[in-house]
């Protein structure tokens, strides 16, 4: 009986340790989210600003290249191949 009580106490301590571990990890993820959210919003603001810029250059190739970059910007960076069903 003493062994069973000891196991229950150890199990309770284990549960407390696991809960504390997850609370610490969740806190770290929350702080990381708070830090990265403004950075992402600022990046999105400047991305929109760059996309709406007017190109003022003597060389027409520069304007064409900028328009080509804008088209590529909207495309997916990584594209997984579609599986052919046969």
Image: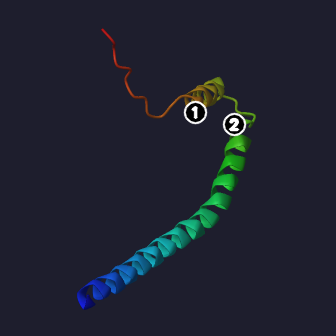
The residue sitting at the bottom extreme is: 2
Q: In which quarter of the image is residue 56?
A: top right
Q: In which quarter of the image is the C terminus?
A: top left
The residue sitting at the front extreme is: 1
Q: Which residue is drawn at 64% across and 65% down?
A: 34
Decide which of tag 1 and tag 2 comes sooner along the chain: 2
Left or right relative to 49: residue 26: left
Q: Which residue is drawn at 59% across and 30% down?
A: 74
- Residue 23: % across, % down: 51, 73
Name the residue tied to disc 1: 73
Pointer 1 and pointer 2: residues touching (CB < 8 Å)?
Answer: yes
Circle 1 residues within 10 Å: few <14, some 14–19, many ≥20: few
Query: SS for tag 2?
Result: helix
- Residue 14: % across, % down: 36, 79
Circle 2 residues within 10 Å: few <14, some 14–19, many ≥20: few
Q: Quadrant of residue 32?
A: bottom right
Q: Which disc number belongs to residue 51?
A: 2
Q: Quadrant of the N terminus?
A: bottom left
Q: In the figure, 11 relative to 60: above or below?
A: below
Q: Residue at x 53, y 66 (%)?
A: 29
């Amino acid at each position: 009986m003493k062994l069973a009580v000891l196991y229950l106490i150890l199990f309770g301590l284990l549960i407390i340790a696991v809960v504390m571990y997850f609370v610490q990890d969740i806190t770290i993820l929350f702080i990381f989210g708070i830090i990265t959210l403004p950075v992402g919003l600022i990046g999105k603001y400047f991305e929109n600003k760059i996309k709406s810029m007017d190109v003022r250059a003597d060389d027409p190739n520069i304007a064409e290249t900028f328009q080509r970059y804008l088209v590529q910007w909207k495309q997916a960076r990584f594209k997984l191949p579609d599986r052919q069903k046969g």
